Image (cartoon, grey):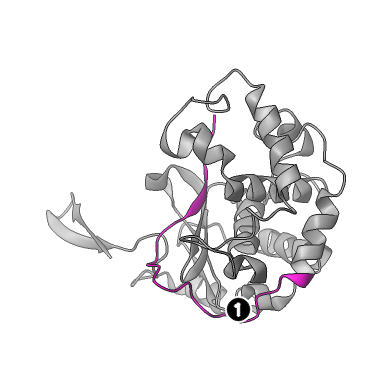
Amino acid sequence: MQPTCDPTRGKRVERAKAYQRKKHRSGVMSLFERISPLRKFFQGGVELDHRVSPGQLPLFTAEILRLLDLFEVPLAWGSGVELKIRCLGQHRADGLYFPDPPVVALDRRTLQSFAHELGHLFDYRARTGRKASGPVPTLSPEPLFAPFRARMLERMQGASSSPRAPGAGSGRMSWRYFASPSECFARAFEQIVAEHVTHPSFMVGTPSRYRNDALYFDSIPEGLEAYFRSLILTEVPALPSESLPGKSARWLCDRPLVP
């Protein structure tokens, strides 16, 4: 919990971080959490901000379940994973992925980063990625994804506007961040999803939005969809509930708010 000052009372209060459960939650939302069909996949639980519109939940839930069915995602991917829909304003992002413990956090005001964060989940929980070297083992640096990332970087290098141009921006708005294997991987999966779901969508933008953005492909590369479909079936975590050794709970990947 993060101590902050409550300006109305002049007292220090503890606010849950994006990956933590809130101590005090709406009774109505708690009921929705317990009966949510999303718990079948997100076996670590579902947490809903009290400001989430109940009218949105059935539509959003149905769309997520259709996506998981469309890509034939095995339930093992969701073992131990918690889904949180809450306000992420201080992070300046509309979605966050925490690998340990695994948490997908979405900003309640947009929800459109779901496919992007699901891409991060596949990247960080894949069986091959967990055998890789490095501080945080992931699948995205592997050779099979390299040609797709190279094509994405080629388009980014041709852009002249920030934050897409090399050397532009800083931190999570920098070339280095957007060009990282994990971010390219998540954006590639996000764009594949956009090509297959019905629009308007809660989870992604329209196909034209991505094709016109230099951070994405101007057209879907041949073999990209087959790559993702294959890894979803073959890279299922061997021990899906295991945690990454030595890693504290913190965001490693997010989808920043890009103008």
Crowding at mark 1 (Cα within 10 Å: few <14, some 14-19, many 20+): some
Up-down relation of residue 161 to residue 164 (above or below)? above
Q: Is residue 216 visible?
A: no
Provide residue 9's location: percent of width, then percent of height.
Answer: 15, 55
Q: Quick check: 156 above or below 195?
A: above
Q: Nearer the viewer, residue 166 or 118?
A: 166
Does the magenta segment cover residue 162?
no
Pick the front one: 18 or 80: 80
Q: Residue at x 56, y 38 (%)?
A: 178
- Give the residue drawn at x 73%, y 60%: 63
Task: Give the total of numbered labels.
Answer: 1
Mark yes or no: residue 205 visible.
yes
What is the x, y in percent for residue 202?
67, 50
Residue type at mark 1? Pro
Quarter of the figure with the N terminus: bottom left
User: Quadrant location of residue 42?
Assistant: bottom right
Q: Quadrant of the C terminus?
A: top right
Q: Which residues are magenta?
A: 234-259
Q: Residue at x 70, y 28 (%)?
A: 155
- 240 left or right of 173 in image: right
Q: Is residue 39 above or below residue 171?
A: below
Q: Quadrant of residue 150?
A: top right
Q: Nearer the viewer, residue 4 or 250?
A: 250
Farthest residue in the left direction?
10
By secondary structure, the bulk of the magenta-drawn segment is best described as loop
The residue that label 1 is drawn on is 240
Along the line of sight, which residue is nearer the eye, 140 or 241?
Answer: 140
